[in-house]
Image (spheres, helix red, strand yellow):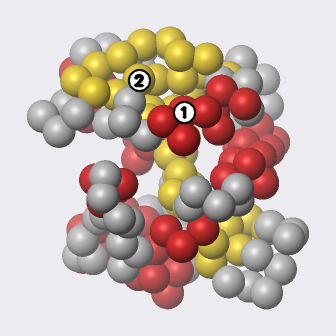
Amino acid sequence: MNLTIHEMTEAFASESLRWRYEPPYDFYNVELSEEALAERLDGTYRSVLDDKGTLIGFFCTGESAKVPAGEKDGVYEEPAVDMGLGLQPELTGKGHGKLFGKAVLASIQQDHEGMPVRLSVATFNERAIRLYENMGFVEQDSFQTEACKFITMVKK
């Protein structure tokens, strides 16, 4: 499967906001609202499409990729490009993460050459943490939200 990166469109933003993950990953579900749609269309989000033009995931960089509780704890103070990503629920846990993650990381590294890339992940999401470790990310910090514990991971 060939993946391509595209601007986030209103149709893709709306589609991704309708995705529903099974527990415990339902933590990542976002309600479709004007505010959520506006964030997905603010220029920091990108669509990831397969070779048929189907939306299989998205990613964001910058402030949109940060967890507010982590900002309060100072985990984002070191210079880095923050990234957040989401894979279509039907594709998770089936071995698609590696190709998806590599495509996202390559796009971010191309746009931000030489900058470390950082992400935040809930500690219960062990399969994502394994994927990120296999991609060369290392744990850097941790923080707690009302919902769960997070770690930040960095790839230099």
Residue 129 — which label?
A: 1
Where residue 148 appears, x then y in whole percent? 23, 33
4 left or right of 69? right
Q: Quadrant of residue 133?
A: top right
Q: What residue type is disc 1 on?
A: Ile
Nearer-N-terminus badge (1/2): 1
Q: Quadrant of residue 112?
A: top right
Of the residues tagged 1 and 2, which is closer to the observer? Answer: 1
Nearer the observer, 62 or 85: 85
Residue visible at 12% across and 34% down in the picture: 146
**Is the residue 27 above or below the residue 113 in the image?**
below
Q: CA distance from mark 1 to mark 2?
A: 9 Å
125 left or right of 113? left
Q: Is residue 153 visible?
A: yes
Where residue 121 appears, x then y in whole percent? 43, 35
Q: Are the residues at dot 1 and dot 2 in contact (C-beta closer than 8 Å)?
A: yes
Where residue 90 appears, x then y in whole percent? 54, 73
**Is the residue 89 above or below the residue 24 in the image?**
below
- For mark 2, what is the residue? 151
What crowding class fits label 2: few (fewer than 14 Cα within 10 Å), some (14-19), or many (20 or more)?
Answer: some
43 left or right of 30? right
What crowding class fits label 1: few (fewer than 14 Cα within 10 Å), some (14-19), or many (20 or more)?
Answer: many
Nearer the observer, 69 or 24: 24
Where residue 33 appears, x then y in whole percent? 23, 76
Q: Quadrant of the N terminus?
A: bottom right
Q: What residue type is disc 2 on?
A: Ile
Q: Quadrant of residue 136?
A: top right
Q: Secondary structure at mark 2?
A: strand
Q: Secondary structure at mark 1?
A: helix
